[in-house]
Amino acid sequence: MGREVNPESVLGISVRRFVMVNKCIGCYTCEEVCKFLNDEQQFIKLYEIESGLSKPISCFHCVKAPCVTVCPTNALIVDRDGAVVTRVTRCIGCTSCIIACPFGIPDLLPVGHVVKCDLCSKLRSEGLEPGCIAVCPTNAILWGKPEDITRMLREKTLLKLVEAYRR
Amino acid sequence: MVKFVKVLPIAAKIGTVTIRYPYAKPIVTDSFRGAIEVDPSKCTGCGACTRICPPKALSLNIEGGTAILRYFVGRCIFCGMCADICPEKAIKITKEFELASEQVSDLYIDVEHEVVTCRKCGSKFVTSKLLNKVEQKLSEFSKELLSLCPRCRRVEMLSKQVYLR
């Protein structure tokens, strides 16, 4: 499903990542891979909502991103693929983006600038998928064009409905 | 000896160049950088200046119910980076350089800010001014979320996502 990389979707304008929380088994693999790829910083992180129930959260790369609107130095931009990325050299560490983000995603480093998930821009430039998506053992993290993902999810719910009728 | 005599008519023509410093105003150039001045009405307490400051003369600490932006003149190297970086342009470089004092307390200049407490975990995470500024920029934003600290927001949004299914 989300496994095979469609070159068109990688180079296309808007690629989205979608986490299917019900499929996630809370194995922390995405977190470890993210740590490995980004010098010990985790941009996807699991939180324990209930005892024994951990789910991942990471940047949603909003289309109308509040962090981008609020940034005074335009350090946060939406890149070619539609991912919200930080330009470290421009960031002044004013923490406005952290306050603006509805999910509280950006992290402030002690050095004085903000870091956040960039959907593995280095891997993407080589035509590869972001680490968390490639590595997820249950394919809970999907990646593709928004219309493809919505279509797939609709098909899934339809299938479920049909199954329920058959019984 | 004869060479020195040549200077005398020039000196007589120009007159005295030095000024009576403590009584007369000192001559400082336009590009002179002295102590900084923080405008409390403009400052939002975001702490960008404290992060750029090379000698860490500026510090932002949350003590009790207030966030204090402290400027310690004794450490300042007068580089002016804080004034450059301030997103609100609240920091002004003055021409003030006579900063010696007998009291150490005179070397500290504080700007106090109100802090917002997270309604879930109770941690003080941001000054209310910065929160208001962000709120103004994002008009259609839920107030409920803004009163949560970043960590609580993550957990809150995650649990919403999970329990919807």
Image: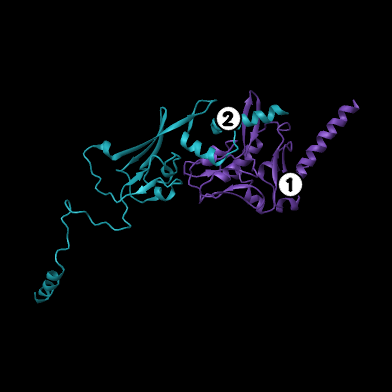
Chain colours: A purple, B cyan
- Would you call the spot at circle 2 few (<14 residues within 10 Å), some (14-19), or many (20 or more)? few
Q: Amino acid at mark 1?
A: Lys
Circle 1 SS class: loop
Q: Is residue B26 left or right of residue B152?
A: left
Chain containing mark 1: A
Place of residue B41 in the rendered image (x, y in percent of width and height, measured from the top left): 40, 40
Identify the residue position indicated by label 1 in the image.
A145
Place of residue A54 in the rendered image (x, y in percent of width and height, measured from the top left): 65, 29
The quarter of the picture where the C terminus of chain A appears is top right
Q: Nearer the viewer, residue B10 or B159?
A: B10
Identify the residue position indicated by label 2 in the image.
B144
The quarter of the picture where the N terminus of chain A appears is top right
View extreme (bottom): residue: B2
Q: Which of the two marks, 2 or 1, is nearer to us in this view?
A: 2
Place of residue B149 in the rendered image (x, y in percent of width and height, measured from the top left): 53, 31
Place of residue A46 in the rendered image (x, y in percent of width and height, measured from the top left): 62, 33
Q: Is residue A12 left or right of residue A38?
A: right
| The quarter of the displayed image where residue B151 is located | top right
The residues bearing labels 2 and 1 have C-alpha atoms spaced at a distance of 31 Å
Q: In the picture shown, does residue A67 fall above or below A10?
A: above
Q: Is residue B78 left or right of residue A76?
A: left
Circle 2 SS class: helix
Q: Amino acid at mark 2?
A: Glu
